[in-house]
Amino acid sequence: MAIKLKNNPLHILRALPVWRGILYVMLSLLASTVTLTILLFSLIQIQKRYSLADFMMRTITALLGERQAASLGFLLVFFFCLFLFYRRERQRYIAAELRQLIREAGMIAGGQLDYRLEEREAAGLDELAAHINHIAVQARQAAVEERRAEQIKNELVTNVAHDLRSPLTSIIGYLNLINQDEYRDEVELRAYMQIVYAKAQRLHHVLNDLFEYTYVQNKEILVNAESINIEEMLNQLVVQHRLQTEEAGMHMRTFITSENPVIPGDGSKIARVFENLIQNAIRYGKEGKYIDLSVRDSWQAVEVEVKNYGKTIPSVDLPYIFERFYRVEKSRSEFTGGSGLGLAIAKSIVQLHGGEIEAKSTAGATSFVVRLLKKT
């Protein structure tokens, strides 16, 4: 679509040097005088030869008078000359503004993406400048996203390498001891095998979490919509985790106040959300002994809260708790945390269902609140 240049005579006249304006007026006066003289002389000559010309001259003189006719002709020629000079200056002015615009656009093209063009409304180039500025903003955002993607990739490689290398090193070490018969008896051999098995399970868990996180990051994946009763799902999860909570010396309690906690969604994915939250509560809330699961209505959504009474999450860590591989315990020890992907997976699944998830942590209690839209 072509961009139309706007006429703004005042801006053009303000940019015109005084000496040039005086020159244009003098030239217009001169041109008007010469033109009028030539015109009158020609008409007089024509009048002598043609009766029609004589009739026209007499008619004009009768209507306006000789002086008025001459003055009108003079003014017409004078203003026509000024108009021609104005057109010339307008073209010069727009050309100058275009050259400046090109120079500034060259600065952006040269990598100065924070630079913004002045929107030259005077020359009618404000729309063009606005479009170029918009392109610069988009280019800046693309550059930021590219750097962020590169940083995420580097962090991903570093974290995955660490989480995979530790169990692999142990597996190789113990298998090497077994291969070289460096064990005292059958009991020590079985102990080595149990360690290898535990490390292999850890490795399998990290890889599964990594693949699932990558999968749920795809916003175009299809969610198999079905009716899910959140109360029934949580009761099943309580039974499934009973042995694990008892081994941790904990007890799960449910508080259901929602009248009809039914939502549309993918049952297996939603179950994974609450499994991750329960696992997180078991891992970090052992000191509190209880895990409370609450279900309540919240406007057009079902709100589920998973609360534990263990250690408080520091306020500096709370904004980043859902980022992949982020762990409050920074050593990334396999004995003090999971893969660092559980909460990131939970958030991605909730967002795929159009819901929200947030973390709250105060003295003596940490809770994760999930809001999922009800079935309409």
Image: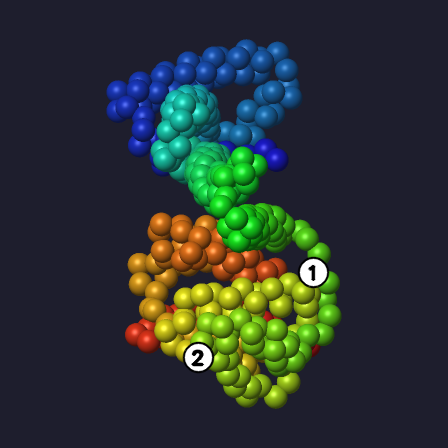
Give residue 75's position: percent from left, percent from top.
42, 28
Give residue 241's position: percent from left, percent from top.
57, 73
Most extreme residue toward the front is 185
Residue at 49% x, 53% y: name it.
339
> Closest to the observer: 275 or 267?
275
Q: Is residue 247 above or below residue 98?
A: below
Question: Which quadrant would the N terminus be assigned to in this image?
Answer: top right
Is 148 situated left or right of 263 in this image? left
Residue at 31% x, 63% y: name it.
314
Question: Which quadrant would the C terminus be assigned to in this image?
Answer: bottom right
C-alpha gap between disc 2 and disc 1:
33 Å
User: How many other residues sit within 10 Å of disc 2, few (<14), some (14-19) or many (≥20)?
Assistant: many
Q: Residue 223: which numbered mark, if any?
A: 1
Q: Which residue is mark 2?
A: 290
> Closest to the observer: 7 or 367?
367
Tell me if I can see residue 216 in this picture. yes
Give residue 306's position: percent from left, percent from top.
48, 74
The amino acid type of the residue labelled 2 equals: Tyr
Residue at 55% x, 27% y: name it.
58
Q: Which numbered disc, 2 or 1, marks the residue closer to the eye?
A: 2
Residue at 57% x, 37% y: name it.
179
> Closest to the observer: 306 or 80?
306
The amino acid type of the residue labelled 1 equals: Val
Q: Is residue 291 above or below residue 192?
A: below
Identify the element where label 2 is drawn: strand
> Closest to the observer: 50 or 221?
221
